[in-house]
Image (cartoon, rainbow, N blue to C red):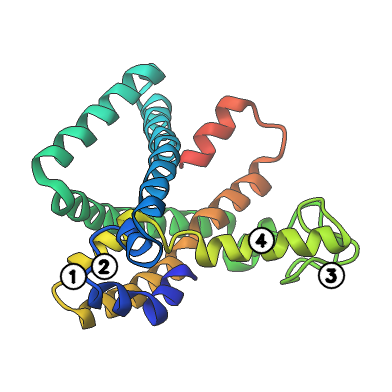
Amino acid sequence: MCLIIAGFFVVRIARRAQYLTIMDFFEHRYGKAMSIAGTAVQIVTYFGWTAAQIVAGGAILQALLGWPLQSGMILVATVVTIYTIIGGLWADTALDFMQMFLTCAGLIMIMAGIISSVGGLRELFGLAGAVNITEGNEFAIWPTKDDGYYGYFGINGFMYYIAAWLSLGLGAIPAQDYLQRTCAAKNESTAVKSTFVAAALYISFGVLSPLIGVVAFGALGADLTAEQNEFTLIM
């Protein structure tokens, strides 16, 4: 959602203003002090974001190869640091581009295998039926009176529901990596078109990962050990 919004309202403005970082916008609009404050906040938040990805990479190596978590984290951090220092934004973008195709191919193969193993699409969606949702409300697109939204009911449920949409639609627009990729495109038209293509890919393939997880939960049951859950989530 944020890609679609950015494609319509942000990309052209950012490129024409020749912003290199998201803080260039804050400096241009609100002054140097706001730019410095925003930079400090962004550095702090990116520590957590980066750490989470390093831990996730270590967990994947631990689950698939049996390595200690700490060793996997060190390897992931070392590899990412080396190729980023050597190649900069181009190396990071090129690797993301390759990873996207590998991820999409993997999701397609996993989904095809799951459809075959469960006996078809009807059985697939049967296993993917919502858990702890009142019968008849499985496909509700907003909080219902009986089910609420993730345990929140009434006005609180709607507020959390709206907040979730806002975080999806607006939360990633000020991300530094998104702006850098936008400004690195060869021209404005390419930047806008690539944003919409990326949005279409997110919609098409982004739904497969949670669907695989929901189907695995429905097929394997809720009484899995922590180790089994971790491996299921990774796969």
Query: Residue 98: image x %, image y %?
Result: 22, 55
Between 21 and 149, the one lying in front of the other is 21
Seen at 52% across and 60% down, the residue is 115
Between 130 and 28, the one lying in front of the other is 28
Of callouts 3 and 1, which one flags the residue occurring earlier in the amino acid sequence? 3
Seen at 40% across and 35% down, the residue is 47
Of callouts 1 and 4, which one flags the residue occurring earlier in the amino acid sequence? 4
| Residue marked by disc 4 | 163
Between 28 and 104, the one lying in front of the other is 28
Specify whether 166 is left or right of 200.
right
| Residue marked by disc 2 | 182
Per the rendering, the mark at residue 185 is: 1
Q: Are marks 1 and 2 in contact (CB under 8 Å)?
A: yes
Among the 4 quarters of the image, the one containing residue 108: bottom left
* Residue 148 in view (yes/no): no
Mark 1 and mark 2: Cα distance apart in space = 6 Å
Specify whether 90 is left or right of 113.
left
Say what amino acid the circle numbered 3 marks.
Gly
Say what amino acid the circle numbered 1 marks.
Ala
Of callouts 3 and 4, which one flags the residue occurring earlier in the amino acid sequence? 3
Answer above or below: position of 223 versus 122: above
Say what amino acid the circle numbered 4 marks.
Ala
How crowded is the residue under tag 1: few (<14 C-alpha within 10 Å), some, or many (20+)? some
